[in-house]
Each structure stands twice: as C-alpha cells, then as structure tokens.
Image (cartoon, rainbow, N blue to C red):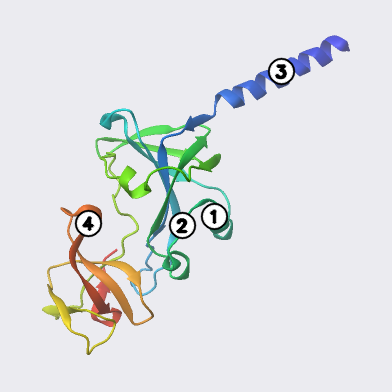
Amino acid sequence: MKKYASLMFLIFISVFSLRAMATVEIKNGVLQAYWQPNWNADATVNTPELEFRYFALGNKKKDNKVIDITAKGSEAQKIAFIKKTFKNIPDNFFTFKEWYVNQPGTIKVPAVVNYMECNADNYKADLQSFQPDNAAQNADDMMTQDFGGCGSDTPYLVLYQLKEGEKTLSLKSEASETASDLASVKSNETLAKIRTIDKAWIYVAVYDEAEKGHLSNRRGFVKLSALTPLN
C-alpha cells in the first residue's frame, strides 16, 4: 500500500512538473485588446468581436513576433479583465466597441504555436495570465517596429467608401453640416474610422498604407449616411 501511495505521489509530481515546464513566459512586449469589425451579410449591422494579440519584442528585429491570443470567457469577463489590467482606456473603446488599447507587460501561455500562412511565420497561443508593467515606456512607441506575419496591421479599423454615385465628399471641422470643410475625398479613396461621435457622425482619416497606422493627416468629421462599409 505504501509503495502504491509513493508511486501515485511520484506520478502527481511528474504531471505537475510537466505542466509547469509547459508554461512559456514572455516579458518584453505589449498586450493589445481590440474590436474586430464583424458586419452582417448586408453590411448594415456591425457586431464587433473583442480580440487580443501580444507584440513580443525580441533582442533583434528578426525576433519580433505578433502572437494572436485566445482568451477564455465571455465578452463581459474579457471587458472586466481589460478594465482591471489596462491603463488609459479611451471612453469610445467600451461605449462604441471600437479601436484598441495597449498595455505593456509579461504574458504566460502554455505554448506558442508557430504555423505558416501566406508564406510567413505566424503565431498563436492561449492566455494563461498577464502581469501589466505600468512603469514601461509608452506602449505605442514600443510597437513602432516591424513584427512580420501576414495578418492585418490594423484589424480594428472600420473602413468606408463613398456611397455609389457620389464623386466627392467633404470632411468637416466639426460634427455639423454647417462646419467648414477641411479636405475633399474622392470616390476611389477609402476612409478609416478613428472614433464615433454619435449615431449620425464619425471622425475619420483617409486610409493610406504608407502612413503610420494607415491613417493619413487628411482627417475630419463625416456623416455615416454618406458612407458604405468596406469590411
């Protein structure tokens, strides 16, 4: 009986040790929570989905990785986690379920899975725990490097174009039809939403892949009724 108990104890210790060894800790990086646009078939209703990814900073540029993170729990539980863990959350992030928030810190995952897609290395992992580093430098500055992969750099962007038949559109200085014009947008250009003002108006930038965050300096307010969703 004693031999059996000893054997069971050794098995328990071995399993526990294997689980502990399976944990991967990544200290230098930024966890990002963002709302992924999710339009219905008619592109009339957007039901954003809350997603996570971790920007792991390596010692060399080639070692940088973007890891898609799967967090368990309901949307309400994920929101509670963000409120508890992240700093500097803009009001529109929860009010309108848009944009993103960044938080430097250490992440623990059971394993980082590497897979090939579009001839590039991509990574994914399940979230085990996250410890924020509130003393770290500005998170946006930490993420100005190239992280590779083939996913979108800006999966949180909601993109629009002018409604069919419209040739030009003016971006306004305020959310008002009587406000002065800041810039003119052509029908072949794409607009990216930066934030929602209300049910009628949004603040946008002309989409430009050459610019940081794919947002040009041509920005202004526009009525939603003048636009058609692209994604």
Q: Does residue 231 appear left or right of residue 124 in this picture?
A: left
N-terminal label among 1 and 3? 3
* Residue 127, visible in the rendered structure: no
Q: Residues within 10 Å of mark 4 (few under 14, many from 20)?
A: some
N-terminal label among 2 and 1? 2
What secondary structure is marked by label 2?
Answer: strand
Image height check: is 131 above or below 224? above
Q: CA distance from mark 4 to mark 2?
A: 21 Å
Q: Are the residues flagged by discs 2 and 1 in contact, CB closer than 8 Å?
A: yes
Q: Are the residues flagged by discs 4 and 1 in contact, CB closer than 8 Å?
A: no
Q: CA distance from mark 3 to mark 2?
A: 39 Å
Residue 167: horizontal and vertical position, in percent?
A: 11, 78
Residue bearing mark 3: 11
Badge number at residue 50 = 2
Identity of the residue furthest to the front in this view: 135
Kindly indicate the quadrant of the structure image that contains residue 190. bottom left
> In the image, which is nearer the foreground, mark 4 or mark 3?
4
Q: CA distance from mark 4 to mark 3?
A: 54 Å
Amino acid on which disc 1 is placed: Lys
Badge number at residue 214 = 4
N-terminal label among 4 and 2? 2
Amino acid on which disc 2 is placed: Leu
Residue 197: horizontal and vertical position, in percent?
A: 36, 76
